[in-house]
Every structure is written in structure tokens, then in C-alpha cells.
Image: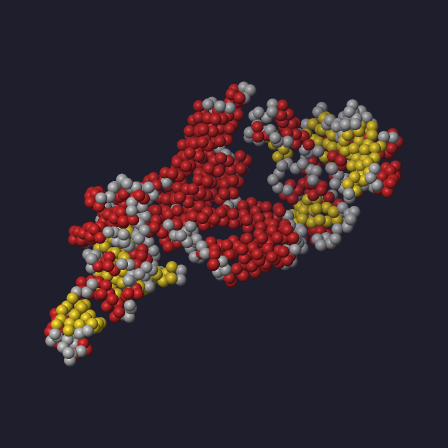
Amino acid sequence: MTSKTLFFKFLKKDLGHRLWAVALIGLGCFFAYPVLAAMEASQIDTYATLEEGLRYYNKNMQYMHSFGNGITVFITMAAALVCGMSSFSYLNSRSKMDFYHSLPIRRELMFGANFISGILILTVPLTLALAAAAFVAIGNGADAAALWPLVWSGLGLHLIYFILLYAAVVLAMIMTGNLVVAFLGYVVFCSVVPLAAAFSQGYFLIFFDTFMTESCGEFIESATRISPVLEYLFAAENYTKGDPSQMIRLAGTVAVSGVLAFIGCFLYRKRPSEAAGKAMAFEVTKPIIRVILVLLFSVGMCAFFWGLQESLGWGVFGAVCGTVIAHCIIEIIYHFDFKKLFSHPLQMVGCAAASLLILFSFYFDWFGYDTYLPDASRVEWASVDMTSFSGWVSYGGTREREDGTIVWERPEKNWPLYNMEIRDVDTVLRLAEAGIAEIDAERRDGEHYERVNIAYTLKNGKKVYRSYYISLDKNMELFEAVYANDEFQKAMFPLMERSADSVVQVGYRTGGDREEIRLDALTEEEAEQLLETYQEEFKTLTFEQMKQEPPVGLIRFYSALDLEGLSWWKREDAQGFQNYPELRWHYSYEMNDKDFYPIYPSFKKTIALLGQYGIQAGDFYDQVSVYNARIIQYGENGLVKEITVTEPEEIDALTDVLIIPRIAYYNPLLETENLDIAVTLSDLDFKENHQYPVAIPKGRVPEFLEERLSEGNGQAK
Amino acid sequence: MIEAVNLTKKFDNIVAVDHISATIKSGSVFGLIGTNGAGKSTFLRMAAGVLKPDEGTITVDGMSVFENPEAKRKFFYISDDQYFFSNAAPVEMMAYYKMIYPGYDEARFHSLMTNFGLDERRKINTFSKGMKKQLSVICGICAGTDYLYCDETFDGLDPVMRQAVKSIFANDMEERHLTPIVASHNLRELEDICDHVGLLHKGGILLSRDLDEMKMKLHKVQCVLKDEMKPEALTGLDILKTERRGKLLTLTVRGDLSMVEFQMQNADPVFYETIPLSLEEIFISETEVVGYDIKNLIF
């Protein structure tokens, strides 16, 4: 009998012995696809029109058959476990090993037949169920031309990832001799690298003041995707993004599955039959896995106790405790004997020492992470993000997606750090130097500290990230030097690079309940003039101006797509998001509040231009009448004093200094008094019930108010 | 012929088979005897290619067994805990074996199943231990291989069935030169089946002899010597053991029967007779010679 014939006969017999798995998966698929498709078809009539119902049904059916379907992901992951474990469960039984391995069949053939039959156990019922669901859907009016490609592409992609997971389970089965240990092995296989990456990031976060998650963002993502399960979840999630790199990853997944299957076959041939019933099949893997897991657990326990107590002593306790517990558990599992918990004591001591070395190296910063300052000659360019200055800026832009939705899409990465190229590296290095000097310095009350993130792009292409907390008052010149840099401005404030040809409308917002005013009849030249004037004035804004001036209003330069997006949201909202039910709970008007820039009182030219077009940009309180103001002062123990101001003179004195918090938010250097203030405008019908919050800049409390607040020695009213 | 040379297998720190060299000739029934843990099963599992030897080699008709389907087609291995597919009936096992062993004799399978009174379509998991053993032997016999490895297969077989199996063995040995290799911890079970016996102890082989040869070379002599004569005077005899009950002497002697009788006649005793030794007695004598007390090893 030829090997080929025997292979297929063996495959058929193996499938016959595992009909229960086919039936189990088949049952799950039956309910998850054709039954669900039929149930959803009965919902078509519940929509306002048949067309709407069909559109919704079509969309759901396409999702059901697509790669992004979470139910299929779950079924596939569960099936990988069931198929992988049942395919090679005989490896854990001595009598089965005696039976199979005494037969005149090559082990490669046996492995191949078992491996393939495991794949078929999912493939056959899943294919049939998806095809049946597609027939049900098409029979109920779904678009066949759109559905069938999704059925086959979705099935193919799920099967690719199924084989990846399945190969990982098979590998775990071959490397162990017990079903429970094999399952644990699979869990370890899927989680050890992501956990190691997460713990290493945790250590950097805990022990280094200057650490930024961007430092290891790509590393963490890559490490996370080493896990077959997480790779599958990421891929399914990213599927809809249409990222071309997905195809490369897909090819990689196929290759990795092939490599895993090859390793599985190789190990299967090498696997000693006497491994059946033991925890681990290969002696050589025992210390490697033990050391990795013990170190990981030890580092994790150290981080846990540090998190609780933030002391070196507790960190040491956690590391030692973690080492001993993990070592003992692993030894018990390895030997299936509680009394063997302290086997290999030298390895345990070694792991504890290594874990402590890791802890001390981070705690004492032996490698000088926090004090790192690159040589200027090695730096190609630097990028700086002053976080409170970038906090109000809307990075990203309006985008129309393939599914017809129009959204404000944020960039995935920190925009300034990835888009800024400051060539004046020396100034940035001096700023970093100031940050390093303040790492352990005590913070002084009343000083403005700024969180500054810096990325150095070295000449060798490497990017190095650091984050500092720097006193702005003490290093004002340095901050201003960086702020005035053209490259900084362009990347930090995207409007500075905007060209007028994309501007079709200009919006202006001020305080209170005042609606946004739109300039929708500007000519191209007018729009250009307004944009350029604003850019010019914004660019010359100094820190001193910002400290003194609260912004008076906000300006937005709309593109055609911005306006289209706003209309789209308005229209869909009015229709209750029937076509896009997943957006029903989305913050519909997020796009409304994006991309506004502050107008300062010193932006005289901009204010004048706006005035020409009918917008009175200026002090909000010059344009409204305040009916009353309620001021609440809080102390450490709660409410201290509540004052209501109604006298016109006092209201005048107050409105001279009042600012609107939602506009003041655009000026990070403007500090406000710790008072809760609400004003009621005279021109509203429901005066008492229609208050809104305002604030007073620091040090500008009117004299009358200071007196009234100090009356009664700060006693509560 | 199965040949083991310097065969060694360790499980962690335990030496299960310790440098065994043995030859199992074709056409005879080889009995592998030893206590639990003596290494019988390990030896058979290496002979079946289930385990890979740590040292040494084991060959079947000159072919190394491990990962060699050609060598594996020469034998059928019945383990001490034979595996049957869950919920399978004998006929399904037969179909499976038929797929694997090209020379599987299906007609004989049906015939033997009927002769043994076993229902081919009954679930094997409802069979008694003895019935499963019978089924294993039937499956093995019908595989048509040159060698049949039986690990503790005769445990649980009643004397009638043992006799029936023995007859099948004898028939197949006669017709197609089958070589059964039977491992057991019970010497009495092998006595009426084996032609050649290997005694394993603590992983090593104590002796490997032809049973007939042993029976021909060892004799028990009961005699009463004349008053003035002592057993030491029987210098022509290779006396292994002497027992005395009053005037009656029981001697275990090595040598040809004719030579023993000649020597006894020359000694002119009052009375003498030669009695055949049981397998147990032969083993007691042989192992005592090499310094072991077999009662501690087997019984």
C-alpha cells in the first residue's frame, strides 16, 4: 500500500473517530449562521420601509460573513483548542502510544493525517454553515454579488488564523504529556511575550520619570502580536481599515503557521513515547520554560507590591515571593508531586537573584535612562510636544470612510512627535537638560510646570523618546525659543500650515449660549486674507501675552468635507441612525467642536477683519448684560462662602475681569482663581435657572469681591 | 530473528533495561519472564519500536525497528493494556488492522471470533478483561506477521483459552513459522507454551536458554546409597544441589541422562530413579548457580 493511500485511509479513519467534534462544531455553526441569518431576516419587516430593512439586513449579512465577525472569531478560537487537543490527545496515553507507534506507519504520515483531519473538522462544517447562511440571506433579498466574495474571503481569512492557532495548540500538545499541562502550555505560548512586554513597560513607567509609552509602542504592539490569539484579534479588528500592511501580515501568518506545523512534525518525530502522562515531553525545555515563567512571575509580583507600597523593600519582597511561588508551582506541575516543590533550588536562587538585579537596575537607574542626553552631533532632528499647549489642538481631520460615514479621524500616534523636525537641536537639548535637572528637585508652589515630551531622531534612524516635567517660569527663555521655532509651530498647530484653498467657510464662537457665527459668503481672497492674518498673529503670540490675555473667542476654518460631515451627522441623527445603528450612541457632534483656534485680544488685525464681515469679536461682556453673579468659595473642608452680586457697579467691576472657561481652556498659561462663579444674563427669559460658569484670572479679583470674601474671617455663611 | 545487542533504556534515573544482549530465534515460542519492573514490557516496547533505545540496538530480521515501517510490518504488538477505539466493535478494529497490515486474514478473524464465542459487533468496552485479551490475540494472529509480541497477554486467560491460544500458536508456527514472544511474570503460565525462556531481573538478563535443552541437561535423582557411601563419593556427577530425608537423597545434577544413569549404576546404590524437573525447579537451579535465589525473584 502506498504511503499516499495509507495517508488518506488514516485521515478518513481519524475523522471517523472524531465525529463528535465535527458534530459539536457543526451544531455551533448551524445556530451561529443559517439560524441567525433566518432570524435576522424576520426583522426586515420591522423597519419603516422594506428598502431600509433590506439595507440593514444586507449589512448584517455582510458583517456575518466577513472576517470581522466576532462570533466566527470565537468559534474559530474554540475550535482550534478542541481540534488541536483531540487530534493529539493520544500522545498523553501510554496504551494509545503503544498502539499507534507500534503500527508500521511513519510518524510523519501519522502527524500529517492527524493534523489535516483537525483542520477539516472545522473547515467542513464552517464552510457548509456559512454557505447555508448565504443562501438563506440571498433568499431573503440580500445582495448575492456583494455577499459571495465576502463569504469566501472571510472563510479563507478565518481558516488562515485557525491554522495558526491550531498549530500552536498542536505544538503545546506535542511538547507536553498531559491535557491540562498542554492547555496551560498553550496559554503560556499565547501570553508569555505580551506579558513580558507589558511588564517591561510597567517597570519603565514605574521607575523612570522620563519614560514615554511611545518609546516602546511599536515594540509592545509587535510583542503583543506574537501571541497567535492576539494577532488574530488584532487582524480581525484591523480588517475594516483596509491597511495594505494587512496583506503582508497575512502572508506572515501563513508562513508562521507553516513553520509551526513543521516544528510540530519535527518534534513529533523526536518526541519520546514515554512522555505520555508526564508534564513535559522534552527534558531540555523544562529549565528554559521554568526560568522564563519564574522570572516573569517574579517581575510581575514585584511590580504588584511596588504598586501597593511604593517601596524598595516591598519590591524586593514581591520579587522573592514571586520567584519562590512560581518556582514551586512549576516544580509541582513538572513532577505531579507536591513534595518536589523545592527541586532545583539553585535555579530558584538564580531566578531570584536575576529578578532582584532587574529590580535594582531599574530602581537605581544603572543604565542612566533618566539622565540620557544624546550628543547633538548624533541627532538628525528633534520633536517637542508641550502637552498643555497641544491639549486643545485637534489633530487629525475629517475623513469619509468606505461605509459612507464621515468622521473626525484622530491620528494614531502623537502628532507633534511624529511630524515635527526641529533642526535647532541644541535648544531642545538645553530644554531637556533643564528637565533632567528637575527630575529629583522639589516642586515649588505657584510655579507653572509643563510636561514636555521630546523625541530625538538620531542619524542612525533610531527614535529616542523622553518626557520631562519642567518649570516654565524658570526656563521661560528656552520654552519661548522652542515655541517660536517654525517647525515647532507647524507641527504643533496644524492650522499654521493650512493653505487658504481648502477654506470654504469660517466659524466664530464666543461664550454663553451664543450660537456659532458662520461666514459663508467669503470670497477666496477674503478667506485667504483672514487665514493668513490669523496665522501671522498667532505665530507672533508670546508667552507674556498668553499670561496676560484671556482669549475672546474661537475661530475655525472649515473645509468642504468638514461641512459635508456636519450635515451628514445632522441628517443621520434626525433619522435615528437607522442606517448606522452602531453610531447611535456615538457622540454625534464631536466633529462640531473640532479644529477651533483661540483669538486673543491682541489679534487686532484678525478682530478687525472679522468686524468687517459682521462679527464683533471682542470682550463678550461688552456685548451682553449680566443680571447677577453667584460666587462660591471653597476651602479644604468644603463650602466656605457664597456671595451673590447684583449691584450694577459691582457687576461692572466683575465683568471687567470675567473670562469664559471653555474659551480660556485654549490658553494654557492663563491661571484662574479657585472660585466657582456662575452668571445669569439679563437677556434670557429664565434668569434664575439659566446660569453658566465663568472664571476670574489669577490675581485679578475685584477689590469689592476680595473684601466680601474676607469678611467674617472666612466663616461659612 | 530478533536480536538485541547491549540494549539499554532509562526512564529518568531508573534503568529499566540494562545492557541486554539476547537473540530470539524464529520458529519458537520465546518466553520473557521476570518480576514486575524487571524490564519485560520495556524490552518488548523497544522491540515494537514504541521506545527508542538509549544505547544498543534491536533488530528484527536484521532491520532496525525504531521508525522503520518495513521492520514493523514483521510483527504485531499486543501491549499489557491493549488499546481499542472507544465504542468500537471487534469488526471495526479488524477493519483498522486490515488497513494497516496488508496480509490481514479477515476470513480467519471471523472464524476465530466464532470459535472463541466472541460477538464481532458487540462494543469492546462491554467485554471482560479475558475477552479483550482473546480479541487481542485473534487480531494479532490474523495480522499475518512473522512475530507476535504478547505482553502479559495470558494473564486473565482461563486454562481452556490458554490451551486454545497455544494450539493456534502451534498451528501458525507450523504453517507460517510464526514466532510468538510472550512476556509474563508468571513462570507457570509459560511452562506449557514456551520453547525458549529469557529471565529478566532489574533490567538485566540473567539467563536465556532453550527449555528442552535445560530439561535435557538437568535431572533430579532420588536414591538410597549403601550405608558406607556418602554423596560426595559420587564424583562422576555434577551435583548442583543435595537434599536428604533420612536415607533418601534427592540430587539435582547436570549432564546427559545416559551419563547420569551410567554414573548411578556404577555407584551401585540400594535404589535410584531419575525424575524430570518442572520449569520452576530448573529455574531455581539455574539461577542459584548464578547467585540468585529465584524464589525472591518470581514466586
User: Vertically, is A82 above or below A579?
Assistant: below
The residue lying toward the viewer, choosing from B143 and B269, is: B269
Q: Position of residue A585 (x, y in %)?
A: 61, 30
Residue B109, image x, y percentages: 22, 44
The residue closer to the viewer here, B92 or B72, is: B92
Q: Quadrant of the C terminus of chain B?
A: bottom left
Vertical side of B64 occupied by A229: above or below: above
Identify whether B190 is placed above or below A180: below
Q: Is residue B78 left or right of residue A70?
A: left
Residue B22 in which image quadrant:
bottom left
Depth order, front residue of B62/B174: B174
Q: Residue at x 24, y 51 (%)?
A: B158
Can residue A580 be seen at all in this image of the molecule? yes
* Image quadrant where residue B292 sits: bottom left
Q: Look at the image and tell me in which quarter the N terminus of chain B lies.
A: bottom left
> Left or right: where does residue A676 sit relative to residue B241?
right
Q: Is residue B119 left or right of residue A537?
A: left
Quarter location, residue A385? top right
- Kindly identify the residue that appears in the image at 86 percent across and 42 percent down: A713
- From the viewer's perspective, tell me whether residue B156 is left or right of residue A313: left
